[in-house]
Image: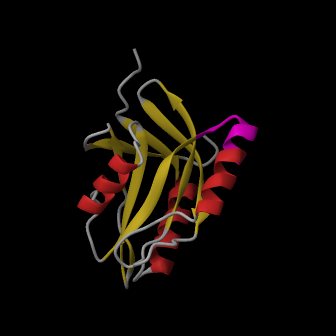
Amino acid sequence: MTPVLTRIAIPARVLAGIAARAAAAWPDECCGLLLGRRDGGACIIAEAVAADNVADDPARRFEVDPHALLATHRRARESGVELLGPYHSHPDGAAVPSATDRARAEAAAAAGEAWLIVPATRDGAGAARAFIFDGKAFTEAALVVTPDGA
């Protein structure tokens, strides 16, 4: 039986990079992909790959550039890591999955994906939150920031 994912671990430098992208993209959403591995009930993020947001309305939703998505899948396969899921920002909003996020996850059959959401305002990025999509709903996961190099 596959362990239930309850924790997402991310190096401080990776989280800081995502936060910087969220702040720089405001008032639009930034987006990218999380690479790493699963270990029991945890997703261990090793890297965040930035991607262009090609959504028709980037201030309200995100869509990872398909070229970046394909390249990241290839890179994951070649390097032995897993594409764990997406990250994105919510400009002037809360770091919780929106109805649009849920619809997107359902359409992509994204069960088991780790999602990281960062709120952003004109003043910068706020505290990120992590979620696991089980195929029907998002459940918040513990976000553990690890020291760099750990």
Instruction: Measuring from the top left, give residue 76's x and y in whole percent.
Output: 67, 42
Residue extending farthest to the front is 107
Residue extending farthest to the right is 78
Q: Specify the quadrant that holds the C terminus.
A: top right
Location of residue 77 by image quarter: top right
Instruction: Measuring from the top left, give residue 125's x and y in whole percent.
Output: 40, 72
Between 143 and 70, the residue placed more toward the observer is: 70
In the rendered image, the vertical position of residue 138 relative to residue 22, given as above or below: above
Asked if the magenta segment contains residue 83, the reply would be no
On the rendered structure, is 134 left or right of 42? left
Q: Specify the quadrant that holds the N terminus.
A: top left
Q: How many labels does the image show?
A: 0
Q: Residue at x 39, y 78 (%)?
A: 57
On the rendered structure, is 116 left or right of 24? left
In the rendered image, the vertical position of residue 30 relative to residue 109, given as above or below: below
Q: Which residue is drawn at 38% across and 79% down?
A: 59
Between 28 and 66, the residue placed more toward the observer is: 66
Between 131 and 145, the residue placed more toward the observer is: 131
Main SS category, magenta section: helix
In the rendered image, the vertical position of residue 146 relative to residue 98, given as above or below: above
Location of residue 3 by image quarter: top left
Instruction: Measuring from the top left, give residue 68's x and y in whole percent.
Output: 64, 60
On the rendered structure, is 28 left or right of 21? left
Q: Which residue is drawn at 40% across and 50% down?
A: 115
Task: Please say which color scheme the image uses.
Answer: secondary structure
Residues in magenta, as a range: 75-82
Asked if the magenta segment contains residue 79, the reply would be yes
